[in-house]
Image (tube, rainbow, N blue to C red):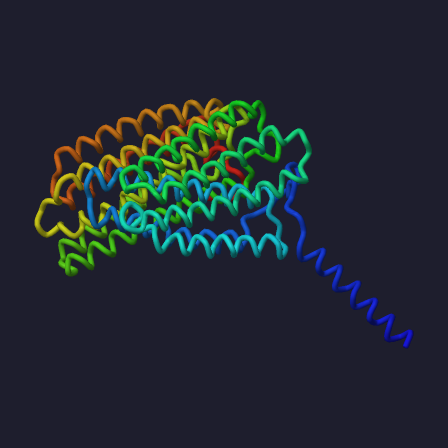
Amino acid sequence: MPDRVGRRAVSWASAGAFGRSFWQPPRAHGDVIVGREVSFLELFYDLVYVVVVGQAARHLSEEVTWAALGRFTVVFGLIWFAWVNGAIYHDLHGRAEGRTRSYVFLQMGVLALLAVFTGGATAGDGPAFAVVYAIYLFLLGWLWYSVRRQDDRAFRRITTPYILGVLVSATVMALSAALPDGMRLAVWAVVVVGWLVGITVLDWRNGATRDTSLSASESMIERFDLFTIIVLGEVVVGVVAGIADAGRTPVAVVTGILGLGVGFAYWWSYFDFVGARRVASRRGALSRWVVGHLPVTMTIAATGAVMVSMVDHASSGHAPDPAPLVLSLSVAVGVLALVVLATSLADWHDLAEVYRPVSVALGVAAAVVLGIGWLAPPPWTQILLVTLVLGAVWFFGMVTWFSSTRHGQAPGRTGRPSG
């Protein structure tokens, strides 16, 4: 009998130890994991956004109009801010134990349901999209609040406004389900603008230094880079869908392959100029870096969506208006957003002899690309010219870099190669 009681005691003690290890509280602010890398769980989580972004882009690919572009901008903004909230929370407070995994999988379930309604979010599925999105934000609000409960008081002046912003946004989104389509979309646009302003204000209010757990860590920088790769995949999807819709004609195939060049040029420009680089400790730099990724990723996804129409109409020699100008506008805004990102980097001032001429070149490229779109040449010609312009800027940047006094390694790396 004593042996049996002893074994039971050991068993209960082991079960208790397992439970405490399996279900741990979130990491508090300041509890930094030095050298943390993006986990397999985060990569799995981001795969759900491949579907969500794809559904948002599908609506634009089917109807390339200025109104459709506006609707896409609002919906993508909501999706992007949902991703930012989830990604930053996990980077600052996630662990590798059961609680974190369970909540991440719960988020993925909600996001999968959100994807179902994303394609029709600005039409008949708008109310369902609003409700599911609100549920997701309430879930994130609870997660952020669970951190606040155990945080040092010094961090509460930062976390409290942020949590209130999440909960207010969730409430507004839920209430918007009862509004007509046009008014609902306007409310969503206000939510997106509110987040842009809120992130900027909080950063300027609290961001005198970035040598804290609130800085952009290597893992967070890598996470944003990976999301950029996700939206670059939309260019590939757009090319494939366009070739398929065009009946695989030779001119459609050629135009599609050239279209891949735009995605390739985006990749080279992003990862050789701004990707995988440390964010400056200057006040406002972090918010500029975070917010700057919105137009970068949004315009890449829009480029992929418009590519469907461009490739589909390659045989006719002219894409329907306003597809050519929408394509060029997407590329031009994305290129200018790279300049915004560059100004937030730690090397912006130290490597001014590289970044400033390249920024001017990017501005010139944006103007040239817009001119090409306004002229609306045949789809294959426009896509080829856009790719050549982006390639010329990249080449100019590399020549500028290697002609500087630095060694032949890209500036400001976080320690991991971009290739």
* Camera sees residue 107: yes
Q: Position of residue 76 (x, y in %)?
A: 35, 42
Looking at the rendered image, the quarter that the N terminus falls into is bottom right
Residue 339: where, in percent of width, then height? 37, 29
Is residue 286 placed above or below 319 in the rendered structure? above
Horizontal and vertical percent position of residue 337: 35, 32
Q: Nearest the camera: 208 or 384? A: 208
User: Does any portion of residue 417 appear in the rendered image?
Assistant: no
In the rendered view, does 7 fall on the left or right side of 372?
right
Q: Between 213 and 409, which is closer to the camera in this rendering?
A: 213
Viewer-nearest residue: 222 or 400: 222
Q: Left or right: where does residue 122 sit relative to residue 408? A: left
- Residue positioned 61% across, 35% down in the render: 213
Total numbered labels placed on residues in the image: 0
Q: Name the residue: 37% across, 53% down.
A: 115
* Residue 142 lies in quadrant: top right
Relative to 166, is 149 on the left or the right?
A: right
Q: Is residue 102 above or below residue 169?
A: below
Q: Find the residue positioned furthest to the bottom.
A: 1
Residue at (52%, 27%) from the top-left corner?
202
Q: Tell which residue pokes out farthest to the left in this image.
A: 316
Horizontally, residue 22 falls left or right of residue 355, namely right
Q: Position of residue 253 (x, y in %)?
A: 18, 56
Question: Among all residues in the image, which is located at the extreme front?
Answer: 178
